[in-house]
C-alpha cells in the first residue's frame, strides 16, 4: 500500500510540474517506467481523486482547479 501511495504522489507531482501534460496509459507507462496495468490503476486513482480527467481520446490531463471549473 505504501508503494502505491508513493506512485500516486509521484504521478501527481509530474502533472503538477508540467501543466498541459496529456498522456495515454502507454505514454505514461514509458515515461514513468511502470507496467501498463499499474500505470492505469494509478491514473484511474487520480481521476477518482479529482486530480486528473480522461479525455475522449484516452489521454489523462490535469483537472483544472475547482475555482476554474464551470
Image: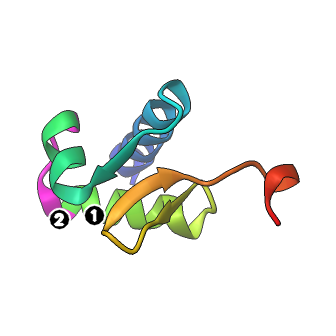
Q: What whole-number distance in Å separates the C-alpha atoms at marks 1 and 2?
A: 5 Å
Indicate the quadrant containing the N terminus: top left, top right, bottom left or bottom right: bottom left
Colour scheme of the rendered structure? rainbow
Q: Residue furthest top?
A: 17
Q: Which residues are magenta?
A: 32-37
Question: Does 67 sit above or below residue 49?
Answer: above
Indicate the quadrant containing the C terminus: top left, top right, bottom left or bottom right: bottom right
Question: Does 9 sit above or below residue 42?
Answer: above
SS for callout 2: helix
Picture residue at 17% right of the left edge, 65% below the top: 37
Question: Does 26 sit above or below residue 53?
Answer: above
Q: Estimate how packed mark 1 is, as few (under 14), some (14 to 19) or many (20 or more) residues with alpha carbons within 10 Å.
A: some
Q: Estimate how packed mark 2 is, as few (under 14), some (14 to 19) or many (20 or more) residues with alpha carbons within 10 Å.
A: few
User: Residue 27 location, x and y as percent?
Assistant: 18, 47
- Residue pointed to by mark 2: 37
Number of the label disc, if any, that sits on residue 40: 1
Labels in figure, total: 2
Of residues 25 and 39, which is closer to you in this image?
25
Of residues 69 and 3, which is closer to you in this image?
69
User: Residue 34 location, x and y as percent?
Assistant: 16, 45
User: Residue 62 location, x and y as percent?
Assistant: 54, 49
Q: Is residue 46 magenta?
A: no
Picture residue at 50% right of the left edge, 32% below the top: 13
Q: Is 52 placed left or right of 68 in the picture?
A: left
SS for callout 1: helix
Quadrant of the rendered image containing residue 40 = bottom left
Number of the label disc, if any, that sits on residue 28: none
Q: Residue furthest bottom?
A: 56
Q: Residue furthest right?
A: 67
Picture residue at 43% right of the left edge, 32% below the top: 14
Picture residue at 61% right of the left edge, 63% below the top: 49
Check contact, mark 1 vs mark 2: CB within 8 A.
yes
Amino acid at each position: 500500500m505504501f508503494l502505491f501511495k508513493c506512485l500516486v504522489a509521484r504521478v501527481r507531482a509530474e502533472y503538477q510540474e508540467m501543466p498541459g501534460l496529456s498522456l495515454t496509459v502507454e505514454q505514461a507507462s514509458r515515461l514513468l517506467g511502470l507496467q501498463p496495468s499499474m500505470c492505469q490503476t494509478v491514473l484511474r486513482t487520480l481521476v477518482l481523486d479529482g486530480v486528473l480527467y480522461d479525455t475522449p481520446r484516452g489521454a489523462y490531463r490535469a483537472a483544472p482547479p475547482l475555482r476554474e471549473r464551470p
